[in-house]
Amino acid sequence: MLKDIKSIGKKSTRDGFGDGLQALGQTNPKVVGLCADLIGSLKMNAFIEEHPERFFQVGIAEANMMGLAAGLATAGKIPYAATFANFATGRVYDQIRQSIAYSHKNVKICASHAGLTLGEDGATHQILEDIGLMKMLPGMTVVNPCDYAQTKAATIAIAKHDGPVYLRFGRPGWPRFTEDMPFELGKALLMAEGTDLTIFATGHLVWKAVEAAKALAEEGISVELINIHTIKPLDEEAVLASAAKTKAVVTAEEHNIYGGLGESIAGLLARKLPTPIEMVGVKDSFGESGTVTELMTKYGLDAVNVIEAAKKVLARK
């Protein structure tokens, strides 16, 4: 139930990646790590200390890292190629398309510091187009977990998936609230049932959606909250079932509204179940330097923006 969703403290999603990779190193000898000169930022130290022979430091050469990862996958390894999201997608899109996606290589592209919450590093590093870039690649699975525990679970789960995966996570400490919740790749997570509208949220915006849903509940508005951690393949059955039930939809994501989760859900609904929809996300803009709080507020990614979208879509029902 909604009232039972509570934060037990803060820890970054990148910490979840690091701990998940360490756990994999202990259980799956095929897993190897690659990094483009950002070991500390990607929290890969524990894996490297335990398995130095299974780690490759490629330096500031991200395109080369993707080629190496493709080769390792061809040799039967499960490479986790890790760097900042901007460098893991925009900088090396051609290499991913040609060397990994086209031949369906079993490479896990692990992208930290995604979205606006990279903070003070500014617009050149705050990629807000990466989900769109990666979901358009045929056969690419796209995963965007919401907190430490879900990122750790996702990091472990994608090792069992045969094929390329884009795993997106972030920099800041963030509320931990899914510790006891299940994770299944490709399956949406129903966090709270409701009847008036559905909020589909992904990544850091899941917590903002929780805050918004609780505030709306105090006003007598019943929200169905669904965590879409796997953006591709989208859990169409879960989306359509909830939209049919509530007949009003809000999406929330730390990404440009063009090419992200909102567009995926809007496209599905347009094809199969036309439903009023409002999208919370960055509106066709680059970011800028600032604190996490300042940026989330300025670019409309707070709980208040989710509440406003909910009331707007209810008026269109």
Image (cartoon, rainbow, N blue to C red):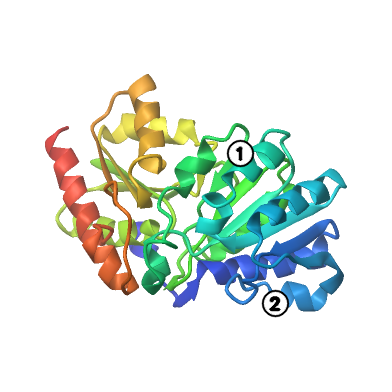
Q: Residues within 10 Å of mark 2 (few under 14, many from 20)?
A: some
Looking at the image, which residue sits at the far top?
271
Q: Residues within 10 Å of mark 1 (few under 14, many from 20)?
A: many
Residue 211 percent location from the top left of the image:
29, 62
Left or right position of 75 against 311: right
Say what amino acid the circle numbered 2 marks.
Asn
Looking at the image, which residue sits at the far left?
315
Residue at image position (61%, 39%) is: 140
Let me know if residue 183 appears in the view.
Answer: no
Q: Quadrant of the N terminus?
A: bottom left
Q: Earlier in the sequence, mark 2 or mark 1?
A: 2
Residue at image position (71%, 44%) is: 161
Image quadrant in which you'd find residue 83: bottom right
Q: Secondary structure at mark 2?
A: helix
Residue that badge 2 annotates:
45
Residue 2 percent location from the top left of the image:
34, 58
Residue at image position (55%, 65%) is: 149
Q: Secondary structure at mark 1?
A: loop
Residue that badge 1 annotates:
140
Residue 201 percent location from the top left of the image:
38, 50
Asked if residue 175 is positioned above or below residue 265 in the image, the reply reads below
Determine the CA span between mark 2 and mark 1.
27 Å
Asked if residue 172 is positioned above or below residue 139 in the image, the reply reads below
Residue 80 percent location from the top left of the image:
70, 57
Residue at image position (14%, 33%) is: 316
Left or right position of 248 against 90: left
Comparing 238 with 267, the one in front is: 267
Left or right position of 54 against 36: right
Say what amino acid the circle numbered 1 marks.
Met
Disc 2 to disc 1: CB gap under 8 Å = no
Q: Quadrant of the C terminus?
A: top left
